[in-house]
């Protein structure tokens, strides 16, 4: 897999020949996919970065797992958009920013009383929103 900053498409490299190394990367990639899936539902946990790292692990270990990840119907297209075009669709941006603020707003309203924790959550929400909105908009 190429570096994140390039505009080349997601690439698969030949798997490592050593079986123990392949299994290590498959297990690590699967753990990263699990964290990425959690990030879809938890507003402060990013998902794309974990899916990108999982793609790198699968790219070194398993053509099937790599293909599954990059063609997955729920997050494969978003992963390819972010990796190949360094951007996101308008719908992905709206969903991401909206769920971020809804999750943080509900968390702060119902569970957080400490003003410093609230301020930290607010700062994180603002920073993540700026990042998401600053991404190039991918048009289809």
Image (spheres, helix red, strand yellow):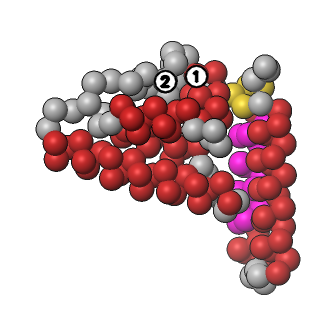
Which span of residues is magenta-colored?
Answer: 120-133
- List x then y, in percent, for residue 24: 25, 49
Whether tag 2 and tag 1 are in contact, CB under 8 A, the answer is yes
The quadrant in which residue 93 appears is top right
The reply to whether the magenta stretch includes residue 77 is no
Vertical order, 116 against 60 (above or below): below
Residue 56 placement, left or right of 130: left
**Image quadrant in which the N terminus is located:** top left
Can you identify the residue that label 2 sits on? Answer: 10
The reply to whether the magenta stretch includes residue 121 is yes
Label 2 CA crowd tier, 10 Å (few <14, some 14–19, many 20+): many
Residue 22 placement, left or right of 77: left
Q: Secondary structure at mark 2?
A: loop
The quadrant in which residue 57 appears is top left
State the residue at coordinates (78%, 19%): 140
The overriding secondary structure of the stretch rendered in magenta is helix
- List x then y, in percent, for residue 48: 59, 43
One can see residue 75 in this view: yes
Vertical order, 84 against 66 (above or below): above
Q: Secondary structure at mark 1?
A: helix
Can you identify the residue that label 1 sits on? Answer: 84
One can see residue 56 in this view: no
Residue 47 placement, left or right of 18: right
- List x then y, in percent, for residue 44: 66, 60
How far apart are the alpha carbons under marks 2 and 1? 7 Å
State the residue at coordinates (66%, 54%): 40
């Amino acid at each position: 897999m190429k570096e994140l900053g390039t505009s080349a498409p997601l690439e698969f490299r030949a798997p490592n020949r050593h079986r123990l190394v392949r299994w290590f990367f498959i297990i690590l990639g699967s753990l990263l996919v699990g964290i990425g899936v959690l990030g879809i539902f938890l507003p402060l946990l990013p998902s794309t970065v974990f899916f990108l790292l999982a793609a790198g692990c699968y790219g070194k270990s398993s053509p099937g797992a790599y293909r599954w990840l990059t063609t997955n119907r729920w997050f494969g297209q978003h992963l390819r958009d972010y990796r190949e075009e360094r951007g996101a669709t308008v719908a992905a941006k709206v969903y991401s920013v909206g769920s971020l603020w809804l999750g943080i707003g509900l968390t702060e309203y119902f569970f957080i009383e400490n003003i410093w924790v609230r301020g930290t959550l607010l700062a994180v929400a603002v920073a993540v929103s700026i990042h998401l909105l600053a991404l190039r908009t991918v048009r289809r």
